[in-house]
Amino acid sequence: MIPTIFALATAPGRAGVAVVRVSGPASGDALAALTGKRLPAPRMATLVRLRDPKTGEALDDALVLRFTAPRSFTGEDVVELHLHGGRAVVAGVVEALSTLPGLRVAEPGEFTRRAFENGKLDLTEAEAVADLVDAETSAQRRQALRQMEGALGALYDGWRERLTRSLAHIEADIDFPDEDLPSGVSDAARPVLDALAAEIDAHLDDRGRGERLREGLHIAIVGAPNAGKSSLLNALARREAAIVSARAGTTRDVIEVHLDLGGYPVVLADTAGLREAAADEVEEEGIRRALDRAARADVKVAVFDATALPTLDPATVALLDKDTVVVLNKTDVVDAAVSMVGGWEAVAVSARTGAGLPELERRLTAFTADRLAGSGAPALTRARHRSALEECRDALRRALTAPLPELMAEDVRLASRALGRITGRVDVEDLLDVIFRDFCIGK
């Protein structure tokens, strides 16, 4: 028998309201044991007193909801107990549930797993539930909501349906040569496969937009020692995240802060000052890490010291490219009327007074939006999606050059399975359904 599971569905700790969810065939019995009353009508919020089934001690006055299968999040009978959020209340209810027969504490993610197993969610939608819980910016929230509503799964299911139909045509030519089928049935699949491979290529060619939006765009602050990188990080973060000192080489390791720029997530990193001769092996390692972070960053913020003009740090100049925002810092100390640095347009700022920071934030937001804003089509959000899509695309390319229809069919089948792994739908019955529906085989 399927065990009934329960767990706190809201964040642990003290709160105004805490929700304990119970899912499984014994959820109704559990509610009856806690209340000693008849079960409330499904989907009707009811105020009841919860008591310990063994001692009769009052636990809480709670609002309870009951959902009957399959019309629930998990597709099973579900009970939700909306409690006062004190630690003692939650602990008492959880302890009472644990004493009931047939109930156990849910494992991490088990409610969502049951929703997937019962056909309430596909794998992309289940992943989106986790993304929505973790969303820290409005852009992350929008992407997670769209995926949870099925936009990404619908795209992949649509592609898989086209593959299934093409495979059915190819298989019909192979397996039923004596039937009265239209001529060139399998040849009609080629343009469909070619078009689908091109669509997958375009979907993959997105610069990792969905993955970056989930994880945050990486911005590295680079520059010479004492250029004001740590002060700039603190100013953008609006808190003292990095130690600031007049002594050169204070920053030895990479220091990260997470920011919300225009609704987009950003990981801003302060790095060690760049110079040719390091003071010791620790600073040398810091410089190596700074160069490595700059090479891997999506955007660089190159900071130059206005008090050092016209001299420019050559190590920082060497890093300038189209993915760099050039900053001229300490303009409160020196009134430098400079708009270009190293051949690149510069933003004049003072990390100490805040002058120029709004313009710098606008530039960084524009860079971030350019890399993360979508065209309207759902974006793939995980490395496993990308891997499966590449496998599907490669199989389609092989199918288009296959010398025999049997080999063509096998590659199309592999492509379909790769797509099915993304959503968790890998059904062999689909092929038979299309064959019999399209060609009336076995009439």
Image (cartoon, rainbow, N blue to C red):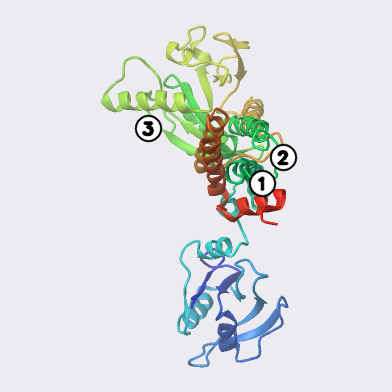
Q: Amino acid at mark 2?
A: Pro
Q: Secondary structure at mark 1?
A: loop
Q: Residue at x 47, y 81 (%)?
A: 102
Q: Give the mark toward the camera: 1 or 2.
A: 1
Quarter of the image for residue 165 reads: top right
Q: Secondary structure at mark 2?
A: loop
Q: Dot 1 corresponds to which residue?
A: 179
How far, Cα to Cα, is label 3 from label 1? 72 Å
Q: Residue at x 51, y 66 (%)?
A: 13
Q: Amino acid at mark 1?
A: Glu
How far, Cα to Cα, is label 3 from label 2? 69 Å
- Judged from this view, the residue extending furthest toward the front is 178
On the question of residue 240 being in view, the answer is: no
Q: Amino acid at mark 3?
A: Asp
Q: Secondary structure at mark 3?
A: loop
* Sequence-earlier tag: 3 or 2: 2
Question: In x, y percent, where is residue 424?
Answer: 55, 53
* Sequence-earlier tag: 3 or 1: 1
Question: In x, y percent, where is residue 224?
Answer: 43, 19
Residue 253, numbered label? 3
Quadrant containing the C terminus is bottom right
